[in-house]
Amino acid sequence: MITELKNLSESEIDLLKKIPAMVTILIAGADDQISKSELKEAVNLTKIKQSKARRELLSYYQEIAPDFEKSLNELLNSYPQDAEVRSKVVIEDLEKLNTVLNKVDKDWATQFISSMKDIAKRVAESAGGVFGYMSIGYEESKLIDLKMIEVPS
């Protein structure tokens, strides 16, 4: 159990655990093509973050990383195939996070949002540019700042 989440319901914790996969699907699918390199980058990143995440988030990543690839694939299969429809549904799901983040420590929430933006950026960079790396496409750039997720006040 992640101590920062002890005051949340089971469904709220479940939502929080799915957020990195949702961010991956949103950004990877922004250009209508979800590439294996984008999905692989997200899986590798969650593994790395088990030991190299911000101190506040280590237990979170240690909890989600072992099953992340399976969760990502299940979530990907549950969303609509049409990119535009999928993006709208994922954004609606991500917006549900705002209520949950108001129930946790503000510093933890701020670190969490920053970490999700890092995932968004790294996934976006993994599929574009010269030799397919380090460039963010136009559609991805419109979503990468995750404006639908708000820092609690």
Image (cartoon, rainbow, N blue to C red):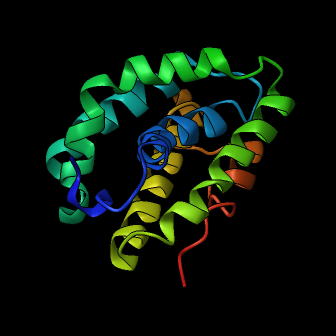
Residue at horizontal 70%, vertical 39%? 90
Above or below 30: residue 94: below
143 on left or right of 64: right
* Quadrant location, the C terminus: bottom right
Question: Which residue is drawn at the image coordinates 69% and 30% (left, top)?
Answer: 29
Task: Point out the residue furthest to the left here.
Answer: 51
Residue in front for this viewpoint, 30 or 12: 12
Q: Where is residue 104, by image quadrant?
A: bottom left
Tell me the quarter of the picture where residue 34 sits.
top right
From where the camera sits, is residue 48 visible? no
Q: How many marks?
A: 0
Relative side of 139 to 45, left or right:
right
Could you tell me which residue is drawn at 23 percent across and 52 percent down? 2
Q: Taking 1 as reference, is 79 above or below it?
A: above
Vertical comparison of 65 with 153: above or below: above
Whether residue 60 can be seen here: yes
Residue 40: x, y in percent?
A: 41, 23
Extreme-bottom residue of the structure: 153
Camera-side residue: 73 or 3?
A: 3
Percent coordinates x, y for residue 7 in the rendering:
34, 62
Image location of residue 42, percent across then percent down:
42, 33
Give the left or right position of residue 136, taking residue 105 as reference.
right
User: What residue is drawn where x is 52% and y is 61%?
Assistant: 100
